[in-house]
Image (cartoon, helix red, strand yellow):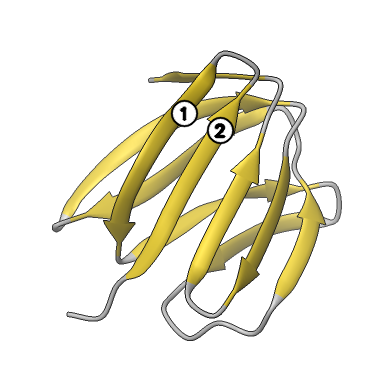
Amino acid sequence: MKTFKLRIVTSRGRLVKTDVESFSGYTTEGSFQILPDHSPIIAILKNADFSYSESGVVKGIHLEGGIMKFKDNRLTITATRGAAV
């Protein structure tokens, strides 16, 4: 199964660094899902719960104050705060 790199960093340090099959959640424009080979995107994230699939297991994370950038099968998220849910 195809994957892409996910990196989530908060003001307290790195929260997640792994390969995932998908990532979904909410931007200020609405809901989204990122899959491998997605078009490049930069967006402001809502304070919300997000989910990602890692090795077929869905995991949850709550993020606040985030910005995401997806390019070349790398999703980087910088957030003020974050915690697993």
Left or right: residue 81 versus residue 46 is left
Is the residue under label 2 in contact with that under label 1 (CB below 8 Å)?
A: yes
Q: Return the residue found at the far top.
A: 12
Give 15 or 35, whichever is nearer the viewer. Answer: 15
Q: Amino acid at mark 1?
A: Arg
Q: Quadrant of residue 6?
A: bottom left
Which image quarter holds the N terminus?
bottom left
Q: Identify the residue shown where x is 15% and y is 58%.
A: 56
x, y (%) of residue 42?
78, 63
Which image quarter holds the C terminus?
top left
Q: Return the residue found at the far front.
A: 13
Q: Identify the residue shown where x is 73% and y is 36%.
A: 66
**What label sits on residue 77 in the rendered view?**
none
Secondary structure type for disc 2: strand
Left or right: residue 54 versus residue 23 is left
Number of marks: 2
Give 53 or 20, whichever is nearer the viewer. Answer: 20
Secondary structure type for disc 1: strand
Gap between marks 1 and 2 measured at Cα: 4 Å
Task: State whether residue 44 is above or below residue 78.
Answer: below
Task: State whether residue 15 is above or below residue 76.
Answer: above
Task: State whether residue 11 is above or below residue 54.
Answer: above
x, y (%) of residue 54?
23, 52
Q: Identify the residue shown where x is 69% and y is 52%.
A: 68
**What label sits on residue 14 in the rendered view?**
1
Which residue is under mark 2? Answer: 9
Q: Residues within 10 Å of mark 2 (few under 14, many from 20)?
A: some
Q: Amino acid at mark 2?
A: Val
Q: Residues within 10 Å of mark 1 (few under 14, many from 20)?
A: few
